[in-house]
Image (cartoon, helix red, strand yellow):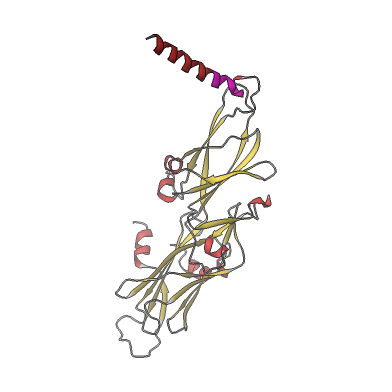
Amino acid sequence: NMQIMKYKLLTFSLILAGLFSTSCLKEDHSDCYNTYKLILSYYGDGETEIFPEKIGRVEMYVFDESNVCVSSGVLPEKDVASRTTVLPPLEPGDYRIVCVGNTYDTGLENLSSRDYSKILFAANDYMEGKTVKGNDSLYYASLHQTILPFDAKIYESTDTIRFASSHYDILVEVVNAPDYVGKHPKIEIVGVSPQTDFENAAKGQATDYVMETVHDGINTTVAVNNIMRHKNHEEVWLRVTGEDGNQVAMINFDDHIKAHKDYIDPSKHECLIPFRIVFGTPGYPIEDGECLEVTITLPEWFVEKVTPEF
């Protein structure tokens, strides 16, 4: 028993010595930091929390008063799952926290520029000079945070950082395509902005995306992906080229959105811009070599889903 008691006393002494060796228990509080928690939040276009349904990965960047990035990294999965994270230890001062959500295939450039309009995120393929299929379903958040000096009494702060959408969802259906168009026509988004800055503004030299296509084995080819939230819809087009190399459809985004303004609202965070391209006239047989009429409309399921109940 005496040996056990000596062991406990020795253990306690070592722990106590360790505690007093830190500056937090001395007059020098230079190594002491307050706790600043952030709640990750995204309401979309509603009034309820939908962060877990929309965002699965978050990169966080912390900038000081000179716009120098002093901390960056991917948040732990447990933080994203719980929607709660803690800022790293920071010296007293004013900071700006920027978060980008769902950066699975997204890269960053100009982080050291000290200019938020020049810090850009974009598809890795774009940054590597490859053909871009589309973007991640990206989200953005920003918050200013003042870090207070430590005064021997730990201060805890909890703030909410709210995300906004940085992308549009794009869906294209090509229906009843004849042989000269084929099951896998080339579907491009022409003139899209390929980058978004740290003010959540889409920008960059107009770029063409080539979407991946899937055929349902019956009569419909589908392409689904995301693009950045470009400012000028009149400068962006959807182009469909048949397997024979001939262009069969060129649709202006602005015209399409205006024609279906009751169903497409680009101001919403969760905005799907769908296209349904139908070949031929129902009830009429297709003759060999015939160039069919093309009708541009919306998918029936999309119209039925968003039409209000009476």
Residue shown at 47% from the left, 55% from the top = 104
Numbered-mark total: 0
Q: Place residue 243 in its image quadrant.
A: bottom left
Farthest residue to the right: give it: 66
Q: Residue 240: x, y in percent?
A: 46, 76
Instruction: Report the front residue among 42 and 97.
Output: 97
Q: Residue 193: x, y in percent?
A: 57, 64
* Quadrant for the N terminus in the image: top left
**Residue 11 on the magenta segment:** no
Dominant SS type (magenta): helix
Q: Residue 197: x, y in percent?
A: 60, 55
Instruction: Report the front residue among 7 and 206.
Output: 7
Farthest residue to the top: give it: 2
Instruction: Report the front residue among 262 and 202.
Output: 202
Query: Which segment is the magenta one?
Result: 17-24
Image position of 303 with respect to 102: above or below: below
In the image, 262: left or right of 192? Answer: left
**Residue 23 on the magenta segment:** yes
Q: Place residue 184 in its image quadrant.
A: bottom left
Q: Residue 152: x, y in percent?
A: 61, 21
Farthest residue to the front: give it: 3
Image position of 272 with respect to 96: above or below: below
* Quadrant for the C terminus in the image: bottom left
Instruction: Report the front residue among 215 and 45.
Output: 215
Residue shown at 43% from the left, 15% from the top = 7
